[in-house]
Image (cartoon, rainbow, N blue to C red):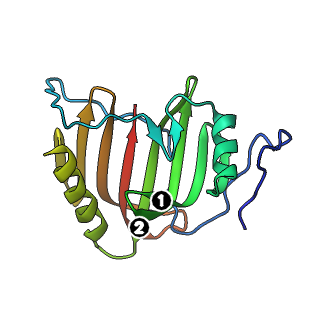
Amino acid sequence: NHRHYGDNHHRPAHVAPPVRPHRPKAHVYHRPTPPRTIVYHSRCPVITTILGIHLGTAFNISLNYLYNNGYIVDGYGNDMIYLRNAPQLSLIWPDAILHYGPNGLIGSEFSYSTSHYDMSRYNQVYSTFVTQYGSPVSYNSSGGNITATWWGREGYVQLQFRHNYSYDGHLRYYTTLSFGL
Protein backbone atom coordinates (compact mmCIF):
# COMPACT_ATOMS: atom_id res chain seq x y z
CA ASN A 1 0.00 0.00 0.00
CA HIS A 2 2.93 2.39 -0.05
CA ARG A 3 2.87 5.24 -2.50
CA HIS A 4 5.51 5.61 -5.16
CA TYR A 5 6.11 9.04 -6.62
CA GLY A 6 9.75 8.64 -7.68
CA ASP A 7 11.16 11.83 -9.20
CA ASN A 8 7.67 13.11 -9.96
CA HIS A 9 7.80 16.84 -9.34
CA HIS A 10 3.99 16.86 -9.09
CA ARG A 11 4.04 15.00 -5.80
CA PRO A 12 1.47 16.24 -3.26
CA ALA A 13 2.84 18.68 -0.65
CA HIS A 14 1.55 16.51 2.19
CA VAL A 15 0.67 12.80 2.35
CA ALA A 16 -0.70 11.67 5.70
CA PRO A 17 0.69 8.30 6.77
CA PRO A 18 -1.90 5.52 6.96
CA VAL A 19 -3.27 4.65 10.37
CA ARG A 20 -1.14 1.92 11.88
CA PRO A 21 -2.30 0.87 15.34
CA HIS A 22 1.15 0.44 16.94
CA ARG A 23 2.91 3.42 15.40
CA PRO A 24 4.20 5.78 18.10
CA LYS A 25 2.38 9.08 18.31
CA ALA A 26 3.98 11.88 16.30
CA HIS A 27 5.67 14.62 18.24
CA VAL A 28 7.89 17.62 17.66
CA TYR A 29 11.54 16.67 17.27
CA HIS A 30 13.83 17.85 20.03
CA ARG A 31 17.53 17.22 20.02
CA PRO A 32 18.58 15.91 23.43
CA THR A 33 20.49 18.35 25.61
CA PRO A 34 24.10 17.38 26.27
CA PRO A 35 25.35 17.32 29.86
CA ARG A 36 26.86 20.57 31.13
CA THR A 37 30.29 19.00 31.37
CA ILE A 38 31.06 16.59 28.61
CA VAL A 39 34.33 14.98 27.64
CA TYR A 40 34.32 13.53 24.14
CA HIS A 41 36.59 10.64 23.35
CA SER A 42 37.81 9.26 20.05
CA ARG A 43 35.19 6.49 19.88
CA CYS A 44 32.20 8.86 20.07
CA PRO A 45 29.97 8.69 17.01
CA VAL A 46 30.32 10.99 14.04
CA ILE A 47 26.94 11.19 12.34
CA THR A 48 27.03 12.30 8.70
CA THR A 49 24.24 10.32 7.04
CA ILE A 50 20.95 8.63 7.89
CA LEU A 51 19.88 5.83 5.52
CA GLY A 52 22.42 7.19 3.04
CA ILE A 53 21.01 10.74 3.18
CA HIS A 54 23.51 13.37 4.28
CA LEU A 55 22.50 15.52 7.22
CA GLY A 56 21.41 18.88 5.88
CA THR A 57 19.87 17.38 2.72
CA ALA A 58 16.67 19.12 1.62
CA PHE A 59 13.27 17.49 2.20
CA ASN A 60 12.36 16.99 -1.51
CA ILE A 61 15.78 15.61 -2.40
CA SER A 62 15.45 13.15 0.50
CA LEU A 63 11.99 12.05 -0.69
CA ASN A 64 13.31 11.39 -4.20
CA TYR A 65 16.23 9.40 -2.78
CA LEU A 66 13.97 7.30 -0.54
CA TYR A 67 11.45 6.53 -3.29
CA ASN A 68 14.17 5.73 -5.83
CA ASN A 69 16.08 3.44 -3.45
CA GLY A 70 13.24 1.14 -2.43
CA TYR A 71 12.35 2.57 0.97
CA ILE A 72 8.70 2.35 2.01
CA VAL A 73 7.55 5.95 2.44
CA ASP A 74 4.35 5.85 4.48
CA GLY A 75 3.71 9.58 4.36
CA TYR A 76 5.30 12.97 4.74
CA GLY A 77 4.69 16.59 5.67
CA ASN A 78 5.22 18.97 8.58
CA ASP A 79 9.01 18.51 8.30
CA MET A 80 8.74 14.71 8.76
CA ILE A 81 9.03 11.70 6.48
CA TYR A 82 7.44 8.50 7.80
CA LEU A 83 9.01 5.20 6.79
CA ARG A 84 7.94 1.62 7.32
CA ASN A 85 10.31 -1.32 7.87
CA ALA A 86 13.45 0.79 7.69
CA PRO A 87 16.82 -0.95 8.10
CA GLN A 88 19.27 0.27 10.73
CA LEU A 89 22.08 -1.61 12.53
CA SER A 90 21.24 -4.79 10.58
CA LEU A 91 17.73 -4.72 12.11
CA ILE A 92 14.36 -3.80 10.62
CA TRP A 93 12.48 -1.05 12.46
CA PRO A 94 8.72 -1.13 11.76
CA ASP A 95 8.40 2.66 12.09
CA ALA A 96 10.89 5.41 11.39
CA ILE A 97 10.65 9.18 11.10
CA LEU A 98 13.17 11.49 9.48
CA HIS A 99 13.02 15.03 10.90
CA TYR A 100 13.79 18.20 8.95
CA GLY A 101 14.53 21.78 9.93
CA PRO A 102 15.17 24.94 7.90
CA ASN A 103 18.59 23.58 6.87
CA GLY A 104 17.47 20.09 5.85
CA LEU A 105 17.72 16.69 7.56
CA ILE A 106 18.52 17.08 11.27
CA GLY A 107 17.56 13.81 12.96
CA SER A 108 15.78 10.49 12.97
CA GLU A 109 13.84 8.06 15.11
CA PHE A 110 13.59 4.32 14.51
CA SER A 111 10.96 2.54 16.63
CA TYR A 112 10.18 -1.04 17.52
CA SER A 113 7.35 -1.93 19.88
CA THR A 114 5.92 -4.91 21.71
CA SER A 115 2.69 -5.43 23.61
CA HIS A 116 4.59 -6.69 26.67
CA TYR A 117 7.70 -5.68 28.60
CA ASP A 118 10.49 -6.95 26.35
CA MET A 119 13.93 -5.33 26.45
CA SER A 120 15.64 -7.72 24.03
CA ARG A 121 15.88 -5.19 21.15
CA TYR A 122 17.07 -2.46 23.53
CA ASN A 123 19.68 -4.77 25.07
CA GLN A 124 20.94 -5.89 21.65
CA VAL A 125 21.40 -2.31 20.38
CA TYR A 126 22.81 -1.11 23.71
CA SER A 127 25.44 -3.86 23.62
CA THR A 128 26.39 -2.87 20.06
CA PHE A 129 26.84 0.77 21.06
CA VAL A 130 28.86 0.00 24.18
CA THR A 131 31.17 -2.14 22.03
CA GLN A 132 31.49 0.62 19.40
CA TYR A 133 31.44 3.77 21.53
CA GLY A 134 32.03 2.75 25.14
CA SER A 135 29.70 3.63 28.00
CA PRO A 136 27.00 6.22 27.28
CA VAL A 137 27.81 9.83 28.15
CA SER A 138 24.45 10.14 29.89
CA TYR A 139 22.14 7.46 31.25
CA ASN A 140 18.78 7.86 32.96
CA SER A 141 16.46 5.17 34.31
CA SER A 142 13.17 6.22 35.87
CA GLY A 143 9.77 4.55 36.18
CA GLY A 144 10.70 1.72 33.82
CA ASN A 145 11.88 4.15 31.14
CA ILE A 146 15.56 4.09 30.18
CA THR A 147 17.51 6.59 28.08
CA ALA A 148 21.16 6.19 27.10
CA THR A 149 22.91 8.86 25.02
CA TRP A 150 26.31 8.89 23.35
CA TRP A 151 27.62 12.30 22.27
CA GLY A 152 30.18 13.03 19.60
CA ARG A 153 31.51 16.33 18.38
CA GLU A 154 29.37 15.85 15.25
CA GLY A 155 26.10 14.51 16.62
CA TYR A 156 24.49 12.13 19.05
CA VAL A 157 23.06 8.63 19.30
CA GLN A 158 20.25 8.00 21.77
CA LEU A 159 18.60 4.71 22.72
CA GLN A 160 15.38 4.62 24.73
CA PHE A 161 13.14 1.96 26.19
CA ARG A 162 9.83 3.34 27.38
CA HIS A 163 6.18 2.52 27.76
CA ASN A 164 3.71 4.77 26.00
CA TYR A 165 0.34 4.71 24.31
CA SER A 166 0.14 4.09 20.58
CA TYR A 167 -2.29 5.65 18.12
CA ASP A 168 -4.85 2.94 18.90
CA GLY A 169 -4.74 3.83 22.60
CA HIS A 170 -3.02 0.65 23.78
CA LEU A 171 -0.03 0.60 26.10
CA ARG A 172 3.07 -0.48 24.17
CA TYR A 173 6.74 -0.89 25.03
CA TYR A 174 8.94 1.03 22.61
CA THR A 175 12.62 0.72 21.84
CA THR A 176 13.58 3.89 19.97
CA LEU A 177 16.90 4.64 18.33
CA SER A 178 17.45 8.33 17.56
CA PHE A 179 20.40 10.10 16.05
CA GLY A 180 21.28 13.31 14.34
CA LEU A 181 23.01 16.64 14.74
Q: Quadrant of the N terminus?
A: bottom right
Give percent across and percent down for residue 27.
50, 45
Give percent across and percent down for residue 69.
64, 52
Q: Amino acid at mark 2?
A: Ser
Which disc is residue 180 wearing?
none
Q: Mark 1 or mark 2, which is nearer to you?
A: 1
Residue at the outermost bottom position: 116
Is 46 situated above or below 103?
Answer: below
Q: Which residue is mark 1?
A: 87
Q: Quadrant of the C terminus?
A: top left
Give percent across and percent down for residue 16.
70, 52
Q: Quadrant of residue 104?
A: top right
Q: Amino acid at mark 1?
A: Pro
Residue placed at 47% from the left, 59% from the top? 87
Give percent across and percent down for residue 53.
54, 39
SS at circle 2: strand
